[in-house]
Amino acid sequence: MLGASPITELGLGDDQHYLGVNGMFDQWSALFFEKAEKLNLILNLNNNNQSSNKFLIHYSFIIKKISIDSQYQQTPANWKQNVAKVTENAILTSPEYNKKVIKVSLDLGNLSPYESFAPGDFISVAPENSLESTDQFLLLLGLLDQKDCLFSIKKTSFSDVFDNDKSGIYTENEQSVKTLFEIVRTMLDINSIPKRLFFKYASCFSNLEFEREKLEELGSPEGLDLYYSYIIVPKRTVLETIADFPSLCGNVPVACLLDMFSRIYKKSYSISNYDPDGKQVSLTVAVVSYRKNARMPLRLGTCSNYLLGVEKGSLVTYDLHRGSMTLPPYKGYGHSSTPIIMVGPGTGLAPFMSFLQYRILNGSYNNTLFFGCRSETKDFIYKSDLHELVIKSHLKLFTAFSRDSPNVVYVQNVILEQYKLVADLICNKNAFVYVSGRLGQMPVDVQNAFAEAITKAGVMGMDITQSQNYLIAMKKTGRYQQECWD
Ligand SMILES: Cc1cc2nc3c(=O)[nH]c(=O)nc-3n(C[C@H](O)[C@H](O)[C@H](O)COP(=O)(O)OP(=O)(O)OC[C@H]3O[C@@H](n4cnc5c(N)ncnc54)[C@H](O)[C@@H]3O)c2cc1C
């Protein structure tokens, strides 16, 4: 309309790319600058004598040390945020099992009517680093002697552009006061994988030539292969990386911490209960711990391990969110005669515990659940609750225990075994279908199993393509919903 034309094609970063968003961005930005240069669009930059590969340090926050005799007091850790009290923290898996799933119950207190939650909603929890890893971080950077010093934190005009924190806690002209220890514990994601930007910052502070060169390489597009083999493949954490570069010790200014290191961010958990008073929520959390290989240290998921450690009575910072899955429209308040089919392997079961409690409370008993885990005796979470519902005829339950028999069985296999029931519910009874759990192959395999089931049952003579199209149409009208996560 205004006569503009694109300089280059739109570049879309892909988080799932094996190199992260950089995998796409490097090629795109090289092309963009090449074209922009030809069009003389970066003339001003060159005239200002700023070489395009010179890294400029930005400060999203002003962090100032406060003298001991000042009137400042530490701002509460949960400043301007929702806090919930932990009322229960229990391990749901068997002690013999090497993975843990926990149930964490929280008292949200008195929420306003706008904040009440519905089945399918989730909350996001703000994790904190462990005391040990916080100390280790400060030690590695030579900042341990300042751990109890108070610092004031205030946004700069760069903050909206460069800071990745979307919590909205820091608005202009407001400042909080924290000890250095609290800044690191509650604000920096020190167990995450360092981004390339970290290496750019780090290269400015290293005073050893060899290390500085390596840091520069790791932060540059040319060093992408090194970044891939050194960081991405072993999933090396921030803590392990700074231990590999001792020249950073004593040289990184506190003022740079919030820009140099990724900010810790909230993680989402489906609410796995229904409380008519809207005060109590339970979360069902798979605790992430894994080794990339026998030589690498154990890696611990930040938020799930934080939740594993929260004690009864302690406070957790959270936000409440509307979920993407919603129950069938009601005929009259609360009750719906529409059947539902839920597929929830592992902690994918979490939102369905909430669905079931809500529906049963409202007299909707036509519920079918496909649940899968490794072993009936080790990680069949909520087994007795589900069996009780089966006995009361409030639930049809089908299980798949992948490691209990020589033939590996997953939920999709059991869906196919139940093809007559599944096809009848979907095609004749207008059932709503819900799929929840880890991303990857599961949601695809489950959809294929439903399509095969419909075809095998011979409903309306649909072949496999027609069955797939039928499911796609269901997705469009909200009758097939899924909520899956990485
Ligand atoms: C809407 C929504 C609802 C959710 N509901 C739930 C829920 O009810 N219950 C639940 O447990 N989670 C749920 N999640 C996932 C949850 O938000 C977190 O992503 C999860 O707990 C991991 O967070 P973390 O901080 O512990 O791990 P992180 O520190 O983020 O580490 C996790 C990362 O570690 C890596 N990783 C994990 N295992 C391995 C392995 N074996 N090999 C290599 N790399 C590995 C993966 O890259 C993974 O992304 C939900 C997510 C969303 C978006």
Image: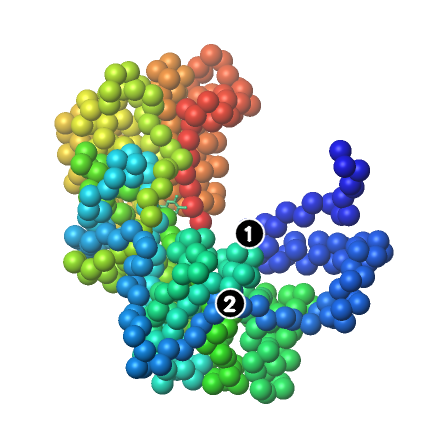
Q: Which residue is mark 2?
A: 259
The x, y position of residue 401, in whole percent, is 31, 43
Q: How far is disc 2 from disc 1 in space, using C-alphas?
A: 21 Å
Q: Is residue 11 above or below residue 133?
A: above
Q: Nearer the viewer, residue 219 or 41?
A: 41
Please state if 234 lies on the left or on the right of 78 as rendered: right
Secondary structure under tag 1 reads loop
Q: Residue furthest bottom?
A: 208
The x, y position of residue 247, in whole percent, is 53, 85
In percent of the image, x 47 and y 45: which residue is there? 440
Three-letter code, disc 2:
Asp
Please state if 221 lies on the left or on the right of 431 as rendered: right
The x, y position of residue 10, in whole percent, is 69, 45
Question: The N terminus lies in which quarter of the figure?
Answer: top right
Instruction: Using a 10 Å C-alpha cutoff, classify the residue at mark 2 as few (fewer than 14 neighbours), some (14 to 19) or many (20 or more).
Output: many
The x, y position of residue 455, in whole percent, is 47, 21
Q: Which residue is mark 1?
A: 15
In percent of the image, x 45 and y 16: which residue is there? 458
